Amino acid sequence: MQHNNKIQYPSSLRILSDIFLQNGLLLYIVGGYVRDYIMGYVSDDIDICSSASPQKVRGIFSSYTDIEIMDVSLPLGTLIIRVGNQTFEYTSFRRESYRQDGTHTPTKVHLDATIKQDSLRRDFTVNALYYDLQNEKLIDMFDGVSDIENKTLRTTRNVQDVFCEDALRILRMCRICAQTMLAPSEETLIAAKSLSSQLCNLSKERIVQEIHKLLTANMQYPNSSHDNIVHGINLLFSSGVSDVLLPNTKQDIAIKAASASSMSVKIALLILDTTDKAASLDYLCLNNDAKKDALFLLNHTHFDDCDSLDFLSTFGYEKGLLLVEFLTILDKKSSTLKSYLKNMKTQDSFISIDTLRLSGEDIMQTLHIPSSPIIGEIKKELFKHVVQHPEDNTRKQLISYILKNHTQ
C-alpha cells in the first residue's frame, strides 16, 4: 500500500539517495523517523535501508572522500554513514530466524531480502513504514498510518510469534506507547501478558535501556508531559512486565515516579515495595551512581525531619535535594530539611562542611590547638550553625562564633 505523504528530511539524504540510484538502488528512510513525522514531530535520529549489502555500500562510497562509512555489525548488515556532521544508521534488507524463547538475538540472518521480507521482521506496524527517497513515496505494508490515526499499536505479524522471537518487544511496546501515547491493541496486550515471563531471558543491559527511555518519555516530543510516563508505567503493570521486573510494587506508588525529575528518585519509587530490591535495581539503573542514589533514598524512607541538621552535616546539599524530592512525592514531612536547603542555596558554593568559609587550619590557629578529632566536631557544629544562620558564613563571623563558644 502506497501513500502520497511527502516527508521532509536533511539534504544530505538526497545526496545519498542519488548515489544509490546511480548504482541501481533505491534508498529508504525506515521506522521511527517516518512514524514521528506522520505524527507531527521531526527527529534527528534517522535510520535508512536498501537491498545493498554492507560490502556493496562500502564499494559504492569508496571513492567519496567526504562520506565516511563505519562498521557497526556486518552480520546484521548495519553500518553508520556520516555525511558532514550528520550520521545515519544503515541496514541492509534482511530476513531473520529466532528461537522461540524471547532471547532477542536471531539465530540466522540473511541479507538477500526484499523490502517486503524486511518489513516482516519489524515489530510493530507503525515502525514498518518506509519512505522511498527517490520517488518521494511512503510505503506502508501493514496499514501503520491507519494505526497512527487510530492511536493503536499492533504487531506486523502474529503477535505471539513476534513476542516469542524477542521478548524485548514487550518492553518496546510499553516504551513506544509512552512516547507516542498510542495504546496496544487488545490482542497485543493479552499476548504481552502471557509472554512477559520471557523477559528473564534477556540481558539486563537491554532491559535497562528500554526502562530508561520509558521513564524519560516526557522528553521525547515537544508536547510530552509526565502523562506520557504515567501511560508507560500503567502498561508495565497491565502487560505483566511489573510482575517480572518489579514484583510486589504497588501501581499507585510506581505512578508517582512519573512526577519525579531525578532518575534516582524515579527508580527508588518504582522499587519501594519490591521484594528483591537488588535484582530490580539491576533492571533499572544505567550506572552505579544511579543505583547508589536509589539505595540511599530507600535507606532514608523513614527519615525524621528533626534530624535534618545531622543529615546535612553528614551527606550535604545535593543528597538533601534528592531526599526532599523523594519525601515530597511520598507525602512525608520534610519542611525543616527544605528550609535548611533554602538557606544553603543563598550561600554561594556552600553545600557541605568542606565549603565552610573557615578551614580546619583556621580553627587550629584561632584556638591555638593541634590537629585532633575535635577540629572535625567544631566544623560540624559550625556547619549546623550556618545552615540555620546563613548570614554568618563569613570568616569573621565564624571566628567570632568559635571564640565565643570554645574559649573560656
Image (tube, helix red, strand yellow):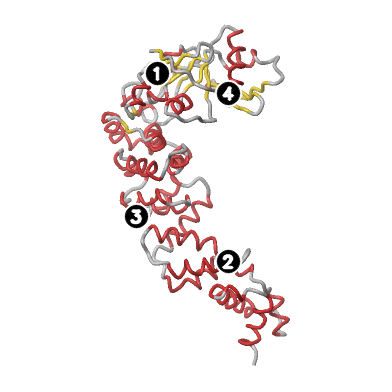
3D distance between C-alphas at marks 3 and 4: 47 Å
Report if the CB atoms under discs 4 and 2 are less than 8 Å apart: no
Which of label 3 and label 4 is nearer to you? 4
Q: State yes or no: discs 3 and 4 in contact (Cβ < 8 Å).
A: no
Q: Amino acid at mark 1?
A: Leu
- Give the quarter of the figure containing the N terminus: top left
Front residue of this view, candidates 343 and 405? 343
Answer left or right for 202 relative to 68. Answer: left
Disc 3 marks which residue? Answer: 273
Q: Which mark is residue 10?
A: 4
Task: Please say if 130 is above or below 377.
Answer: above
Q: Secondary structure at mark 4?
A: loop
Q: Residue at x 51, y 20 (%)?
A: 29
Percent position of residue 47, x then y: 52, 24
Question: Which residue is found at the position 60% from the left and 27% from the top?
Answer: 87
For the point 33% across and 36% down, the residue is 196
Q: Earlier in the sequence, mark 2 or mark 3?
A: 3
Cβ–Cβ under 8 Å for marks 1 and 2: no
Amino acid at pointer 3: Asp
Q: Earlier in the sequence, mark 1 or mark 2?
A: 1
Task: Give the mark toward the camera: 2 or 3.
Answer: 2
The amino acid pointed to by label 4 is Pro
